[in-house]
Image (cartoon, rainbow, N blue to C red):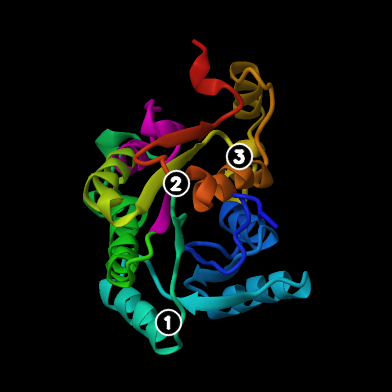
Amino acid sequence: MKTSPFDLSGRTALITGSVRGIGFAFAQGLAEAGARVILNGRSEESLAAAVTRLTDLGHAAEASLFDVVDEAAVAAAFAALDERGIAVDILINNAGIQFRKPMVDLALADWQRVIDTNLTGAFIVAREAARRMIARGGGGKIINIGSLTSEAARATVAPYTAAKGGIKMLTRAMAAEWARFDIQANAIGPGYIATDMNAALLQDAAFDAWVKNSNPAQRWGQPEELTGTAVYLASSASNYVNGQIIYVDGGWLAVL
């Protein structure tokens, strides 16, 4: 019997920054499609709670505790998976932070912290995953998380905009180097999604109205509305899709 090309049974997915919000939604969506998922975060307590939430739903889930900007910790985490015979077939580089301040008042340390977490961390984790995918010879899927700011800028979020623009080009660089190893590297560009990271914006009446009035969908997106795209990019249905960024934004970038 032919299985669906979207079936992820028998595959293992690592999702960085997945204890809540979009990352947890990705983990749940891939688990529902049949994948074994490895959740990641920096807090052992939060990570354990997230794993419990998924396992209570009947999914195969476990934890990998590391900070994506700590190169040694990332290498150690993958080495630990190697020792247990766990091969990561799918990587979602979701870990990210935001920091809002006008550029003229922006400290270099704050700029660097955002770049390191959102862009350099994606490179570090993907490099470890790709090394193993190449050595195994079975290919793999890498999904980076961009943003509307991969395409368009907004005031007061310069480091985030630079990092997410970099994610778009990093994804293309991964495709350029790794496609010949049957690794597909693509990105998802979420629009304004109702998450903890956007809590302050959701509570700002003027900003909330701007989001709803500017977006053809006239609403915020929900984390689970990103999971279909993630499952597609993680599955064999996207085996000839590489170096692309798919915007899931309610039509935002389609209009002026």
Magenta residue span: 140-167
Instruction: Read off the residue under disc 1.
Output: 81
**Label 3 or label 2, whichever comes before in sequence order:** 3
Would you say 16 lies left or right of 176 here? Answer: right
Q: Is residue 153 magenta?
A: yes
Residue 215 x %, y %: 60, 20
Helix, strand or loop at label 1? It is helix
**Label 3 or label 1, whichever comes before in sequence order:** 1
Helix, strand or loop at label 3? It is loop
Query: Disc 3 versus disc 2: distance between alpha carbons?
Result: 27 Å
Residue type, numbered disc 1: Leu
Residue type, numbered disc 2: Asn
Task: Categorize mark 2 by other alpha carbons within 10 Å: few (<14), some (14-19), many (20+).
Answer: some
- Quadrant where the N terminus is found in the figure: bottom right
Task: Categorize mark 1 by other alpha carbons within 10 Å: few (<14), some (14-19), many (20+).
Answer: few
> 113 or 230, which is in the foreground?
230
Q: Is residue 220 above or below residue 16?
A: above
Would you say 26 lies left or right of 256 here? Answer: right
Instruction: Read off the residue under disc 2.
Output: 239
> 102 or 96, which is in the foreground?
96
Instruction: Read off the residue under disc 3.
Output: 193
